Amino acid sequence: MAREQASFFTVVVNGQIEFADLPGCDNAYVKYAIVHGDDWTHLDGPEDGISQITRKNSGDPEQKLVWNFPVEVTYKSTNAFGWPQLVLSVFEIDAFGRDVVRGYGCIHLPVAHGQFTRKVPLFKPLSATIVQQIASFFSGRPAEFSNPKFPAMGEGREVTRVQSTGHASVALNVVTKDMGTFGYSEARGAAARVVV
């Protein structure tokens, strides 16, 4: 019997948010969310999650915040527009027990099958005015995005002032199926090279 032609392609991603390198941060947890376009359908796995709080190991010379928090999700689509993005939000618990944002980051999920390690630059927004800076200093609440998925959106980002805070490392395994049916290459090319 002849195989029926696929009516969609499938992308399966699993892996983990490994660690973050955030100078000056002794404890943190990470929230993740996966953002995708309207043409994508979520099939399986959580699209968001929150990790445990981790602390730096005093015996570790690299002083990393290690989570090894799992990410497993499956999507289907007929169109590559709106390819899924992984958005990270890292928070520290301060001396008063408040959640203080330490950084946001965003990457597209790899577009080819294989194993990947991605370095996700982290940044935090800066207050827009001196009055807001003074208020955030005294309140202990620095500026943060009202929508944690904002780093994945293009609208309004050109006027957002941010400061680099470090980076996170994400290890992902990607499996694709039937992308060739829709004219997309299923071979690993230059875009699929591992970036560390």
Image: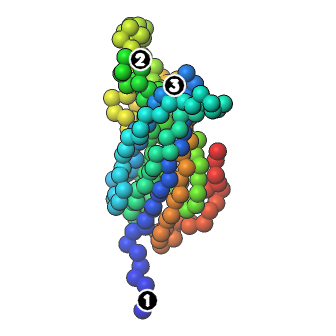
Residue 94 lies, with reference to residue 86, above or below; the image says above
Rendered image: mark on residue 26: 3
Q: In this rendering, does residue 180 appear at all?
A: yes
Image point 38% across, 8% down: which residue? 138
Q: Which residue is mark 2?
A: 95
Residue 135 lies, with reference to residue 69, above or below; the image says above
- Type of amino acid at the residue the image marks with label 1: Ala
Q: In this rendering, does residue 35 appear at all?
A: no
- Type of amino acid at the residue the image marks with label 3: Asp
Quadrant of residue 191 in the image?
A: bottom right
Q: Within 10 Å of the Cα at label 1, are there few (<14), some (14-19), or many (20+) other Cα atoms?
A: few
Label 1 to label 3, Cα distance in Å? 59 Å
Between residue 53 and residue 110, name the one nearer to us. 53
Quadrant position of the C terminus in the picture = top right
Quadrant position of the N terminus in the picture = bottom left
Is the Cβ of the residue at disc 3 closer than 8 Å to that at disc 2? no
Where does residue 123 sit, x and y in percent of width and height? 51, 29
Considering the numbered disc 3 on the image, is that residue within a helix, a strand or a loop?
Answer: loop
Where does residue 10 sit, x and y in percent of width and height? 43, 65
Considering the numbered disc 1 on the image, is that residue within a helix, a strand or a loop?
Answer: loop
Mark positioned earlier in the residue sequence (3 or 2): 3
Question: In this view, which residue lies farthest toward the bottom?
Answer: 1
Quadrant of residue 79 in the image?
A: bottom left
Rendered image: mark on residue 2: 1
Closer to the observer: label 2 or label 1?
A: 2
Q: Within 10 Å of the Cα at label 2, are there few (<14), some (14-19), or many (20+) other Cα atoms?
A: few
